[in-house]
Amino acid sequence: MPKLIVGNRAIECSLVIFDKDGTLVDFRTVDLALAKARRKSVERIVGKDVADFWEKAVGIDTKSGKFDYHGPLATLPSRDEILASATAFYLKGHTWEDAKNLAERAYAEADKSMEPPYGARLLKGVEKALKKLKEYGFKLAIASTDARSRTMVSFKILKVDRLFDVFVGPEDVANGKPAPDMILEILKRTDCRAQDAVMVGDSLQDIRMGRNAEVRACIGVLTGITARADLEGSADVVIDSIARIDVS
């Protein structure tokens, strides 16, 4: 079985599971493109006043590009963020039933308006690292809160989709991160054991998901939203980026 060389550790495993945004892809470009599309759709459907309130509710200022990276837009799968948005609409005077319907409509229209790769841009060194892992025989998988179809299309355009054996998104599981469902689904599809898998991510949600699934090791990367001190308190090892991963 091949080994991952991460920092001063050698980790024997056969499956490497990656988060997407902030781990492999620049989360800033993805989140901002998504936020602007949703803002435009919300404003068209329910008006500027509600759209301004929506921005506060989900944690974004589309004019300045500032995010609350621990807020709903940055951390929740779409189905949960839609509920947060529906609450904002409800607080601005819509009935709860109308608020839910309007939020679902706004998000669906925003998603349709976006063009691939949806703001996605690979972080420096990612493609090279992924190709090396694949050459050494590792199975590679994605566990992302972004929709599976959007992730797959983005990676196809970025020309790295064929490096992955499995893509799992929120539509594939009952419970999102940090529940272990995504990893358990990946293990089932790859016919791998948890003790032969490693989770790699930029957030505490990723690390906790790995812990809950009882994978062999959890690796934190500093290209996303979480500070080193926070990751070091939860991950087995913390590295600057995916480019720091080696194999033997």
Image (cartoon, helix red, strand yellow):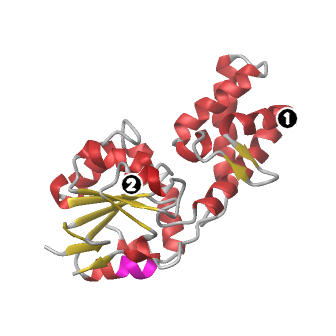
Residue 68, above or below 34: above
Q: Is residue 216 above or below residue 11?
A: above
For image coordinates 17% across by 60% down, the residue present is 196
Horizontal side of residue 195 vs 177, given as left or right: left
Q: Is residue 129 magenta?
A: yes
* Residue 101 position (above or below residue 181): above
**Visible in this render: residue 193?**
no
Within 10 Å of the Cα at label 1, are there few (<14), some (14-19), or many (20+) other Cα atoms?
few
Mark on residue 232? Answer: 2
Residue 21 magenta-highlighted: no
Q: What is the C-alpha distance between the residues marked 1 and 2?
A: 44 Å
For image coordinates 38% across by 54% down, the residue present is 232
- Amino acid type assigned to the residue bearing label 2 in the image: Glu
Q: Position of residue 156 (x, y in %)?
A: 49, 72
- Circle 1: residue type: Gly
Q: Which residue is mark 1?
A: 47
The secondary structure that most of the magenta stretch takes on is: helix
